[in-house]
Amino acid sequence: MEKEEKRYFTSRIIENLDSQIRSLPPGAERNILFARKSIALARHSLISEAKRIIQDLRAINTAYEPRLSAWIMFAEGVVEHAATFDFARSRDRIIRAHLVGQAANDPALAGTAAAWLAYFDFVQGKYKDSRDYLEKAFAWSTLDDSEARSRATMVLGFAFYFIGDLTEAKRWLQNARSHAVRSGDIAMQNTILFNSVALQVSRLTLLDCTSTIDPAELKFAVMSSQSAGNLNTALGIINQPSMVPMQRAELYVIEGKWSSAIEVLNAHLDSLVEEGQSKWVPKFFAQRAWCKAKVHDMTGASTDISSALNTLDFCIDPDDLCVVHSRISSSARLIPDDELATKHDKLAKEYLDTLKDHQSIVKEYFTEIANNLNPE
């Protein structure tokens, strides 16, 4: 391997890997540690350094040793995710790493890869596949496999948030954070915090469309969002530059700060597609339409309604689709266009019913896993 690169931050998990690397002579186990380091670097947005390590490993691995090959594939999948947020390409590499890791009897690799696959499938609404990989993640990993356990318990937290069991959600997300803290994985702590806030904001946005919001819960979400943004900035995590401000924009919408929301949405909405965030584009167009209608820009509201409808195929989640149609309906009533408003109000209610069906499925699948586990 080439001489290690200069580091621009302090991360205990990378320091630990460096220490282990220095303690081993050249060979397979040392090379696997370099693969693990490339994964850690990628999750801190040090993509170039991570790719250089992978390139060196590929040059060394001329005999295609199974375990090292699998770790390289896994690293490539994580780097792809960190660099582009392309779930399909990342998942393809990681599923191959998971399968080879099982065949090569490498529990740490098989378990950690399974946890990543559970995460990918859950956020894409593939709940049965996510459940199956989550079971494998716990079966193949041990308490020492901090990333496997942290990511797996984070997915459990997602599931309980999704079904509205906030107590269990917070318990499992705290468990995920504890694993990350013990291993010094500050990047994973950042991931957990950001996603926890994203879940809060998503839930509050849906409530803003369909019910009422507790002001104390909104205040907590605003403070949490600010903390997540500060940590993200401090760590230099730059792979999704629009997501933190877009999260804040949604809170502006809930707070009724229409002009502030429009300003942020204007600055970042067009970047979402190139950042791999197409699925949220229709929702943000619909959110901006609502804000524009509230500031009496009816022409702008009509344009954004059209944009939301033209990009609707991107949107896959019933909660997001409920928000899209609800915001279109509310905007249309202000334009006014009662026919359009009635049509989309009906669609919003249909997707709310679909969401409840999905919540029942998730409750069945993931409660069973949680009941067989005790938070460590």
Image (tube, rainbow, N blue to C red):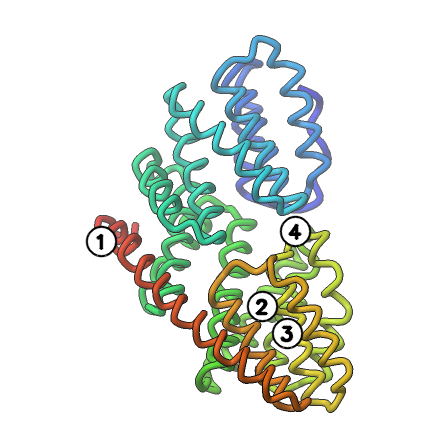
- Camera-side mark, 1 or 3: 3
Residue on which disc 3 sits = 286
The numbered mark at residue 371 is: 1
Q: Is residue 65 above or below residue 174?
A: above
Residue on which disc 4 sits = 276
Residue 262 x, y percent position in the rendering = 73, 78
| Circle nearer the N terminus (1, 4) | 4
Mark 2 residue type:
Ser
Mark 4 residue type:
Gly
Q: CA distance from mark 1 to mark 4?
A: 35 Å
Q: CA distance from mark 3 to mark 2?
A: 27 Å
Query: Quick one: which residue is furthest to the top in this view?
Result: 63
Residue sitting nearer the eye, 298 or 259: 298
| Circle nearer the N terminus (3, 4) | 4
What kind of element bears circle 2? Answer: helix
- Camera-side mark, 2 or 1: 1
Q: Are marks 1 and 3 in contact (CB under 8 Å)?
A: no
| Circle nearer the N terminus (1, 3) | 3
Residue at image location 63% in from the left, 58% down from the top: 232
Q: Is residue 255 above or below residue 357?
A: below
Mark 3 residue type:
Ala
| Circle nearer the N terminus (3, 2) | 2
Q: Are marks 3 and 4 in contact (CB under 8 Å)?
A: no
Left or right: where 301 falls relative to 57: right
Residue 249 x, y percent position in the rendering = 65, 74
Mark 1 residue type:
Asn
Residue on which disc 2 sits = 227
- Camera-side mark, 3 or 2: 3
The numbered mark at residue 260 is: none
Q: Are marks 3 and 2 in contact (CB under 8 Å)?
A: no
